[in-house]
Amino acid sequence: MNAPVNTNASVNANATSNPKADVLIIGAGIAGLQASLDLADQNRQVILVERNPSIGGRMINLSKVYPTLDCASCITTPRMASASHHPNINALTYSEVKNVEKHGTGFRVTVVKKPRYIDEDKCIGCKRCEEACPVFVKDEFEHNFGAKKAISIPFTNAIPQLPVLDINNCTLCGACANACPTDCINYTQQPVETVYEVGAILVSTGYQLTPANAKPQYGGDKFTNVLTALQGERLLAPHGPFGRVLRPSDGKIPDNIAFIQCAGSRDQSIGLPYCSRVCCMYAIKQAMLLSGSLPTADITIYYMDIRAFGKGYEQFYQNAKAMGIHFVKAKVARIKETEDKNLMLRIERQEDQSQPEEVQHDMVVLSLGLKPDWNPEAINLNVHTEYDGFVKSPKAPLQPNITTMEGIFAAGAATGPKDIVDTIGEACAGAMEIENHLRRMEWRLS
Amino acid sequence: MAISVNPHVLDEIKSYGAFDISACFHCGNCTAVCPLSEDGASFPRKMIRYGQLGVKSEILKAKEPWLCYYCAECSETCPRQAEPGEYMASLRRYQIANLDPTGFGKLMYKHSWFALLFSAVTAFILATLLVKIPYGKSPAHWLFGDLVSYSTIHDVGIGLSVLLTTLLIASFFNLIRRSEILVGTSFKKLLKAKMEVLREIGTMKRHAKCHESDERKMPWYIDPRFVHMGIMWGFLMLAMATAFDFLFLYLMPMFVNPIPEWLGAFGLPQVFYPARILGTIGGLIMLWGVSTALYKRLAKSERATEKTRFSDGWLLGYLWVLAITGFWLEIVVTFANKAIINDWVLLIHAAMAMQLVLFMGMTKLAHVVYRPFMLVKHALRNTETHQTGEKQ
């Protein structure tokens, strides 16, 4: 249909002073990283916008990935490094898309860069400020297990290695400014807005977990030893908050741990009727890792049914059973906390006579579901969402990346709950869709 | 008895309530969240299973529907919104309707128009039986008491009681026939179980468990437990007052006026007549209970009353009209009002009261027999396990 385009050489007729790129990708999780690398390798100019101070998304936060039990950070960091060093990728971290408007065949995107309160060009990532800072705040990367300094690099392998100053908790004592060897602390930094002109947009905004209090009967926000799935991941991560598996209330080594499946999905009573797809597998994975760390611990998974749908997943599930992990078919209805912070789970035993029963565990992990993490309506565009809030894919069976707005594409958990394997596949497909779109539009970069 | 699977049974039960247990995927949340589900009485999921399979014989003799007080926590937390609480209520309706020997119960439960029509026709027939026309007196001069004869009320009442007892024995026989439980139970055990059940009926202590873990615990005057206790105790006090009345007026004429002379100083000595004091207090308590319950039903303000059906409203409506007309009559009798409209009110009151009794086996009122019976059955559960243990 169209002649191949020499992207960088040709001149755009509507040339303005705004910086230009071929594609803007919203969200630098594994989907955004994969798509940006694929596009950049095809000599497309990519702007990668990330809300958090580091790229890497949820995956860098995980312990290991199923069904291969590869170390999540070991296989994510190379992708992060490639993206940040790629000459065709401009990664805008700690930035948010504020507005998108149609402009010619492409879009005009307003990106707000949030202040880190440091001069990013001067900072050398030496962490002297972090050492000097006297203020401790909750560590979000560790899901509030443990603390970090009010000025700190978000986590060990964050990219870029730039600290963020938590201005809400900073006492303005000046310790970091005194310690900084390059004099880059700037307490009065302001947000910066930049307008970019791009040919296409990829929405790869991923997911958030169902809130821990979505089902109040579980006391996810009240009981110390009831963890969210991502807290469970951090406990098991090699560089996790405690360096080993301890239960949060008293630092005891837990020896009777329960996983509650469908704690935040497949439940119409909390408004999430769909299956989140990943919970069965991540729970089995965490259970396996737990039995590796705590060989004598009893581990029970309470499930409605196990959905091991992917390649190698059923074998993974059977391995877990063979390892001695207990699988009990029961939906936990209620959790009560005992005086010594153990947890009483009320279930119906469906074997034998089918009796209601209370079982005690010393730690519980809620297998929470996946919810969309970005609302496209916020930027006033014609990108529709489904009833569940995920981006609508009107041509789902054949072109899953197409959204209701031409030129805007979506990939990964933004379009629906998805595991890493499927997310990467969809991100690659999305990169291809975008390349085709740009050629069809005869998009030229001036 | 062989168990046969019959998918039509569920369709039939569905005509007794708005639930969707076809959606149930048996996660067991309802049974686990239920504060009343316990060893030897696992519900609602077990009943859902019976319903899906269509095991009519098990459903009709099941005690589980009557152990449920419909706090609706299972319905609120059901991941499939299958409304297990409403299903349990429907099973209660289904049992009553299917064990009623006349067949009117089924029609009344299923079709509100039939319930209305049937009520109206029987009310008319009863009223005709009660009315006597004061011949030779112009309607303009009719006075309170001319139109309705008290002796007729009593005669008709006794006739109806005999009829009712026959009907009730028939339903009860139906019930017992399906429950082998009472066979081979020692009298001592039965007595113990009965005492346990009487305590439960009087205080509804199990009901207190229903909202134990509920953060939206209600004040006592709208709490379903106390509202129901109000209706029940009010009703019982009124029944006792009627019995005393009968006792004092007919059997012990020397007690016709057992009121001390000095009370006359306050005027209206008849107000202090013991049976009437009891009746007045009972009536007030029942009026509060019935009004609250009726309001909740009409406003559909709670999960448990959201799916209210005509049959629930029928009983409450009757009790409410009876209470209001009862107080009307008490006031006109006290103040010796002679207006003829009071006769019409009396006619309504008497006819509806008789209907209530007559329809006992085929309406929600049947629960006053079913629930205690099933509670006794449940109280004897250890015997039951013992028996099955022997069989094995």
Image (spheres, coloured by chain):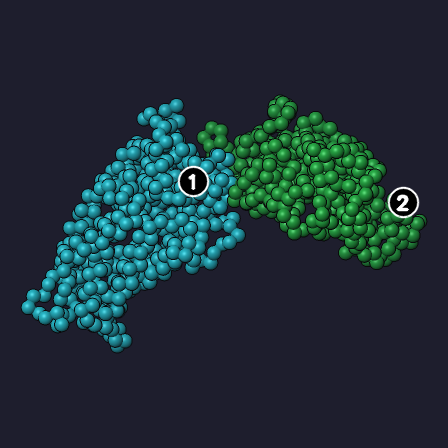
Chain colours: A green, B cyan
Residue A351 x %, y %: 49, 29
Q: Is residue A276 left or right of residue B106?
A: right
Which of the numbered marks, if any, corresponds to residue A124?
Answer: 2
Task: Please state which amino acid type lies under the numbered disc 2.
Answer: Ile
Residue A390 x %, y %: 61, 42
* Residue B188 sits above or below residue B220 on the image: above
Q: What element carries label 1?
A: loop
Mark 1 and mark 2: Cα distance apart in space: 63 Å
Q: What element carries label 2?
A: loop
* Residue B242 sits above or below residue A66 on the image: below
Asked if residue A300 shows in the view, the reply is yes
Give the residue at x 72% y 42%. Answer: A200
Which of the numbered marks, if any, corresponds to residue B20?
Answer: 1
Q: Which of A297 and B362 is in front in this view?
A: B362
Q: Nearer the viewer, residue A313 or A425?
A: A425
Task: Specify few, some or many for label 1: CA neighbours under 10 Å numbering under 14, 14-19, or 20 or more.
Answer: some
Q: Pointer 2 indicates a residue of which chain?
A: A
Give the residue at x 20% y 68%. Answer: B341
Q: In which quarter of the image is the N terminus of chain B?
A: top left
Q: Pointer 1 indicates a residue of which chain?
A: B
Residue A345 x %, y %: 56, 39
Residue A122 x %, y %: 90, 48
On the image, which quarter does residue A230 sit in?
top right
Give the residue at x 31% y 32%. Answer: B180
Task: Specify few, some or many for label 2: CA neighbours under 10 Å numbering under 14, 14-19, or 20 or more.
Answer: some
Give the residue at x 21% y 58%. Answer: B350
List the single residue furthest toward the left: B136
Task: Please state which amino acid type lies under the numbered disc 1.
Answer: Asp
Q: In this view, does A148 lie to the left or right of B62?
A: right
Q: In this view, does A203 lie to the left or right of B17?
A: right
